[in-house]
Amino acid sequence: MTTHMNGEAVDQLTASQKIDGLERSTATQSDLAAACSAQVKEEPAKRAGDTEQSTLPPSRLEEVSEWHIGGKALTSRFFLGTAAYPSPQILQDAIATSGAQVVTMGLRRQLAHGAEAGDFFALIKATGAHLLPNTAGCHTAREAITLAHMARELFDTTWIKLEVVGDAHTLQPDPFELLAAATQLVKDGFEVFPYCMDDLVSCQRLLDAGCNILMPWGAPIGSGQGLVNPGALRTLRARLPGVPLIVDAGIGSPADAVQAMELGLDAVLLNSAVAHAVDPVRMARAFKLGIASGRLAYEAGVMPRQDMAVASTPVAGHPILL
Amino acid sequence: MTTTDTEPKTITITVNGTPETTNARTLQEWLDARGVLPAALATAVNGNFVPRSQRAQQPLAEGDTILTFQPIEGG
């Protein structure tokens, strides 16, 4: 180790600053892109597949850029759930304020007549958002497949958020039943949005089965724990460039959503974090801004972390001692 | 026991987990009797999805299970 003394130490610092400044000024677009891609240096997996998304973050200056998923062009990267709001009016206002262009819905085993069943659906349809029905509550591939077909008929969409729960306490997906259901539903012509674990290999199996999209969990549904395993999500992003990745479940605060977006995930799906907020409409806006901010940060390329301080004020040529 | 009468027999089916009796012979007849708008729900018989267009051809027999699903809020 070098012992730094008075002017000598400062000279060294100045030199390192100069090198640092030089490196910054000559950094190429691909360097920046490499830095953006979550700082994981693995090669992309061959199974990543061809999607419309570029592996390089675009360097546009618009606040929001268009992206594509499931055959639709979107500008928002915020998918919002419709459950557990204090009132239908607050739900409607929250959707409007969120700017979400995709909202999730469910199906329930019931036989209600007329308005009782239709009002809620009409309210959601009036928002103009794309509908993403889910298969919540299913525990087997067979149940999920049947429910998906029902959803396609009821909601008039091929999109399905495929949920096959494997554990009652964590509501985490059953990767085996999920894969079985996804395999069949892809054959049946669905655009499957699988709610899946953040495990790389099981995600690759879903892609092999024909899924074009993955929705890894952040944390157990409704827990608000945020991203319990950001490293796994970082690995997914690095190994599956071009595959739309949507964090689904577990988001608690906008900070969690910012983190997901900074990791380079493509969108965030959440429900409870808005619905259970003291003021859901205000929170919808907070998430909208957070998601947009996190995406901008990813596109801009977050600076690398340093273990030690790196002076930001240039000191070359300044008097050292007054 | 053999019966040759032409009057509709009453059968017992299970609807969303609850047993009920019906004279309906097809899923469509059963729905018509219930007075539910055909587009307001999706149907399955014995766990198999029955599309709207197939309801009139879907026979109902003693012991069959009908499930009906409707849109609700969801996350």
Image (cartoon, helix red, strand yellow):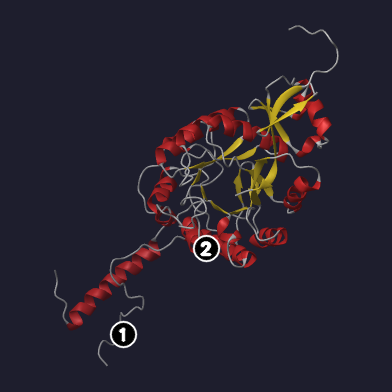
**Circle 2 sits on which residue?**
A254
Residue on which disc 1 sits:
A318
Label drawn at residue A86: none
Lower sequence index among marks 2 and 1: 2
Amino acid found under the numbered disc labelled 1: His
Q: Position of residue A202 (x, y in %)?
A: 43, 37
Count numbered badges in the picture: 2
Q: Which chain carries label 1?
A: A
> What residue is at 65 percent from the left and 25 percent from the top?
B46
Q: Which of B10 and A242 is in front in this view?
A: B10
Q: Find the residue positioned furthest to the front.
A: B1
- What type is the residue that disc 2 sits on? Pro
Asked if residue B53 shows in the view, the reply is yes
Residue A71: give x, y in percent of width and height.
64, 41
- Residue A305 x, y percent position in the rendering: 34, 64
Query: Dot 1 surroundings within 10 Å: few (below 14), some, or many (20 or more)?
Result: few
Left or right relative to A16: residue A97: right
Residue drawn where x is 79% and y is 28% of the image: B30
